Image (spheres, grey):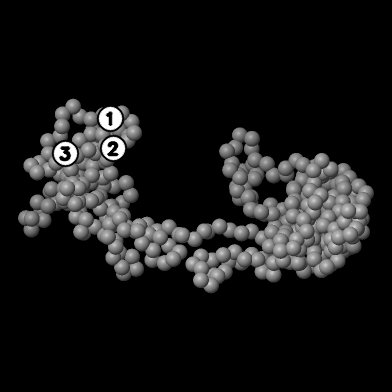
Amino acid sequence: MMDKIQRDRKNLMSWALLFYLGSQVCCQQCGGPCQCQSSLPACPEGVPLILDGCQCCQVCARQQGEACSELYPCDGQRSLQCDYSASFPGEPGECVSQKELGCEHNGVSYHEGQVFQPSCALQCHCSGGGVTCVPRCSEDVLLPTPDCPHPRRVQQPGKCCKEWVCENMDNTVLQDAHIAGSDQTMPADSPYQTSPSSNCIDQSSEWSACSHTCGPGISTRVSNQNLACRLEMQMRLCMIRPCQPVLHRNPQWSRRKCQPSYRSANPVRLFHQGCYSTRFYRPRYCGSCKDNRCCTPYHTGTALVTFRCPGGRLLKHAVMTINSCICHYNCPYSSGRAYRETPFWG
């Protein structure tokens, strides 16, 4: 009983000494000028003086069972190390023998400083009585694209990490050579803006594919690009092609199997729920192929279009603009039939 009281008293004095010395030395930051006491600290008999964790001032080496920290290291000559396994973050640890310091993971013991792999996808490190693990496999995300609309992560035979694959992919794709440039006739102002004085960091997902392969549809995304800088579901109107398109063949595509895109021959108004655009536009549509390939948007933009509604009310809507299309064999099912009687452009 007396031994336990003396040990607790020793630990309490050790913590008090650590707090006192910390007020003298801990206030300095490593890398700055040294601010050491004018006289060397008086250490108990047999306790050596060592440099602190900043390699700046001399302190008494912490002994077995005493409180320790990165600034006040343990006595390395006695093979002592600071154990933080029973400490809360930011609190001192306790000096223990290297033989006592170790880790256990899934029933297996590891010695201090050992790096091990419990599986091929995980790498762990035993340090300070605790285990820290990091994944060895990439955690990237592959979003659907026109040429890979259904990506899947699969376990390949003989490989540790899962890999992204695209089902039924065909390497032969025909990209539209007419990427919109100086002939872009849709407005370019962004419909989603943040406050000029805001430090809002853009967090936006990719726009989804248009909900219909012909006729009017919608495209959505999740974004914080708004005045409140809060994540919200955003929507834009879209139309990949009219359901009864009239292709205007460009001479340079006459000998090819596909016409990836084409522009409306005449300026048209945009219509939405009884409202019409105040301006005329010549939108670009995705074309078609003769070999069972389908053409979908490859590069798109978003424009803010003003609509005039019954009664003279003005309404602004975000509208998808097609800059270029790509042709491939991953053809989605047509879902534009229900919209044949409600034209979006006209």
Mark 2: amino acid? Cys
Residue farthest along the top direction in this orientation: 38
Give x and y (percent) for residue 260.
Answer: 82, 57
Identify the residue at horizontal 86%, vertical 60% (top origin): 256
Please state if 225 lies on the left or on the right of 238 as rendered: left
Q: Nearer the viewer, residue 173 or 25?
A: 173
Is 163 on the left-hand or right-hand side of 217? left
Say whether disc 2 or disc 3 marks the residue closer to the N-terminus. Answer: 3
Pointers 1 and 2 in contact (C-beta within 8 Å): yes
- Residue 303 in which image quadrant: top right
Q: Does residue 282 show up? A: yes
Q: Residue 212, relative to residue 237: is it above or below?
A: below
Q: Which mark is residue 34?
A: 1
Q: Secondary structure at mark 2?
A: loop
The N terminus, quarter of image: bottom left
Q: Is residue 56 above or below residue 11?
A: above
Q: Residue 338, can we see it?
A: no
The answer to which quarter of the image holds residue 99 is bottom left
Cα separation, mark 1 vs mark 3, equals: 17 Å
Q: Is residue 58 left or right of residue 299?
A: left
Report, in whole angstroms, how far the alpha carbon at label 1 lies from the one at label 2.
9 Å
Which circle's residue, 1 or 3, is located before the other in the chain?
Answer: 1
Residue matched to label 2: 54
Residue type (three-letter) at the residue carrying disc 3: Leu
Q: Residue furthest left?
A: 2
In the image as oriented, which residue stretches furthest toward the bottom?
A: 157
Residue under the image location 6 percent in, 55 percent down? 2
Per the image, the residue denoted by label 3 is 49
